[in-house]
Image: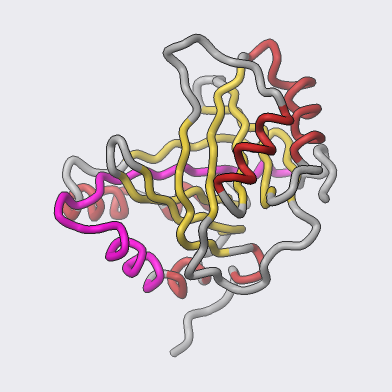
Amino acid sequence: MQAADSLPPVPAVIAIVTIPSPRLAPGWYITHRMRATIPQYAAAPGLRWKAYTQASGPRTFGGVYEWASRAAADRWFDAAWRERVRTSYRPGGRVRLFEVVAGVEAASLPTTPQPSFSGMAILQPVPQPWATAAGRGALDVLKTATGLLFGRLLRGETGEMAILSVWTSKAQAEAGLARANLPAMDPTTKAESFRVPVFLPPAAVGRSPTP
């Protein structure tokens, strides 16, 4: 596992994108469309990895992206991207950006794109007074959990804190997070869960599309 404080000098950025799913589009069709974009994202400048996501209640699709810097994220999610998504999927998508404060990851990750994946991503808000020191401790617990791909302590654009974890399955996510014993926020603030049907690992990015 990577140590919780082994981060590059320029903070990495997590982007969480949610877009309303087309009303008549079944999940399998959305996953099929996701798979078709793997070469595009594998060549995205500054992208480290991407977990393609779907969620219900409300139905959305999108992704969890880790970018090498805020500048790389801003270049991708520019005005043209936002207008294209707004036009195709009214009322448009939501992009939330978080600075990576600390992180851990599995010692062994897939080395090729995973087009038929059954993973889970969880975004758990945590209280600000707890977040920095105890958050790193929670990452140390998470990094020993079976099935963890990535754990990230995040700071949002308005100072809110959260822990993001990406897992190889829902069952492993539930077991690992129970062990980490993350503190609860107020009753109105809940964790967000996303299914990950397609996964693009670090070893599969930074490649030019095949002509």
Q: Is residue 84 above or below residue 94?
A: below
Return the residue nearer the eye: 86 or 133.
133
Residue at the image position 73 percent from the left and 21 percent from the top: 132
Q: How is the image coloured?
A: secondary structure
Return the residue nearer the eye: 100 or 74.
100
Return the residue nearer the eye: 183 or 207.
183
Q: Is residue 170 above or below residue 112?
A: above
Residue at the image position 29 percent from the left and 48 percent from the top: 82
Residue 117 screen position, x and y as percent = 51, 63
Magenta residues (range): 9-36
User: On the rendered structure, is 77 left or right of 129?
Assistant: left
Residue 67 screen position, x and y as percent = 57, 51
Asked whether residue 145 is drawn in magenta, I would say no
Image quarter in which the C terminus is found: bottom left
Asked whether residue 27 is drawn in magenta, I would say yes
Residue 59 screen position, x and y as percent = 28, 43
